[in-house]
Image (spheres, rainbow, N blue to C red):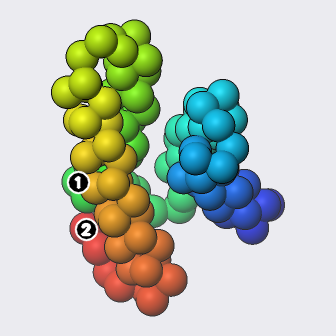
Amino acid sequence: MKKLLYWSLLVSFVCTLSVPLTGLVVHKLASTVFLLLCLVHMAVSRKKPGARRWALLGGVLLAFVSGILSLIFAAAPWVLAVHKVVSITCVFFLAIHIFACRRGFKGD
């Protein structure tokens, strides 16, 4: 069951990142599914989430909210710039999270 969750997270993450290929509608749907799967992943995880994992979930949530705000305030280009910066930062921290979990590092 966890492997299905991990593969679903991977597919939704790749669909979210490939917005130039898939389009904005698929990006919005995939990001919503990714956010929901992240919440399921936090609930299913056996470890008690520490400060770093809560911060990672908060970053994903902030990227989601800034994406919604960039759609609402399309006339303000700074909102889209904030969304891009937060999203790229989340990608790097998600990569670190995956690497650390695969290697078995003891986090917080």
Instruction: Please say whether residue 105 is visible from this viewpoint.
Output: yes
Does residue 86 sit above or below 94 in this rendering? above
Residue tagged 1: 51
Residue type beneath disc 1? Ala
Q: Quadrant of the N terminus?
A: bottom right
User: What residue is at 43 percent from the left and 80 percent from the top?
Assistant: 99
Q: Quadrant of residue 48?
A: bottom left
Would you place residue 7 above or below residue 86 in this image?
A: below
49 sits left or right of 51 in the view: right
- Circle 1 sits in a helix, a strand or a loop, which is it? helix
| Mark 1 surroundings: few (<14), some (14-19) or many (≥20) residues within 10 A | few
Q: Secondary structure at mark 2?
A: loop
CA–CA distance in space, label 2 to label 1: 7 Å
- The residue to which callout 2 is attached is 108
Indicate the position of residue 102 as horizontal and vertical percent values.
Answer: 50, 83
- Seen in the picture, residue 103 relative to 68 is either above or below; the reply is below
Nearer-N-terminus badge (2/1): 1
